[in-house]
Image: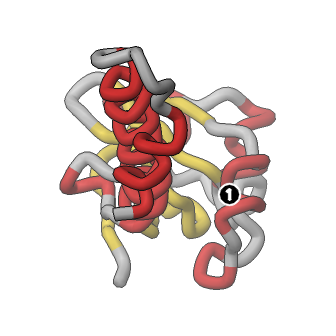
């Protein structure tokens, strides 16, 4: 109703189609704007399994010989203390996983991270041949 009255107010006395064009343009832009806001809010809440942005918490079981030394110290709990070929990682946030690669972020406390902090953290990628298994947490 508001858009209809705004369209009438914008319509000059002799312009038949110009007011309708302005009315449709304003209506389309308003619907588009609110749709983008809604999609942005919903997408951030969708889990990664459904194509959303929210990552899954996981512990990766990694082959230590397939990791770089600097990355091994960051990712593994007991990197310098064990000589095992497979070791458990710290808890990570997995954004994407397929047969070629894992994309994840390392957070100090993955259960209490905010959306802004999550966006500002760097993402890491490792090849799937370094991952023996992944245990996903709730």
Quarter placement of the C terminus? bottom left
Numbered disc total: 1
Q: Is residue 43 above or below residue 31?
A: below
**Residue 10 percent location from the top left of the image:** 53, 35
Asked where in the image residue 80 lies, by quadrant, the reply is bottom right
**Residue 98 percent location from the top left of the image:** 24, 34
**Residue 96 percent location from the top left of the image:** 37, 41
Relative to the observer, which residue lies in front, 24 or 130? 24
Q: Image point 73% across, 40% down: which residue?
A: 122
Relative to the observer, which residue lies in front, 125 or 26? 26
Q: Is residue 58 above or below residue 100?
A: below
Give neighbour class at mark 1: few <14, some 14-19, many 20+ (Cα, 10 Å). some
Q: Image point 22% across, 55% down: which residue?
A: 49
Asked where in the image residue 70 lies, by quadrant, the reply is top right
Relative to the observer, which residue lies in front, 127 or 106? 106
Q: Image point 46% across, 30% down: which residue?
A: 11
State whether residue 61 appears in this view. Answer: no
Q: Image point 52% across, 43% down: which residue?
A: 9
Is residue 68 shown left or right of residue 16? right
**Residue 85 percent location from the top left of the image:** 46, 46
**Mark 1 — residue?**
118
Asked where in the image residue 56 lies, by quadrant, the reply is bottom left
Q: Is residue 10 above or below residue 100?
A: below
Quarter placement of the N terminus? bottom left
Element at label 1: helix
């Amino acid at each position: 109703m508001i858009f209809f009255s705004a369209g009438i107010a914008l319509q000059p006395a002799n312009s038949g189609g110009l007011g309708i064009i302005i009315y449709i343009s304003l209506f389309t832009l308003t619907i588009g704007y609110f749709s983008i806001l809604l999609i942005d809010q919903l997408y951030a809440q969708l889990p990664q399994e459904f194509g959303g942005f929210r990552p899954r918490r996981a512990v990766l079981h990694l082959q230590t010989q397939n990791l770089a030394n600097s990355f091994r110290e960051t990712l593994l709990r007991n990197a310098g203390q064990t000589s095992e070929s497979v070791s458990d990682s710290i808890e990570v946030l997995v954004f994407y996983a397929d047969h070629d690669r894992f994309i994840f972020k390392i957070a100090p406390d993955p259960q209490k991270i905010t959306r802004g902090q999550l966006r500002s953290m760097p993402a890491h990628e490792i090849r799937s041949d370094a991952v023996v298994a992944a245990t996903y947490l709730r």
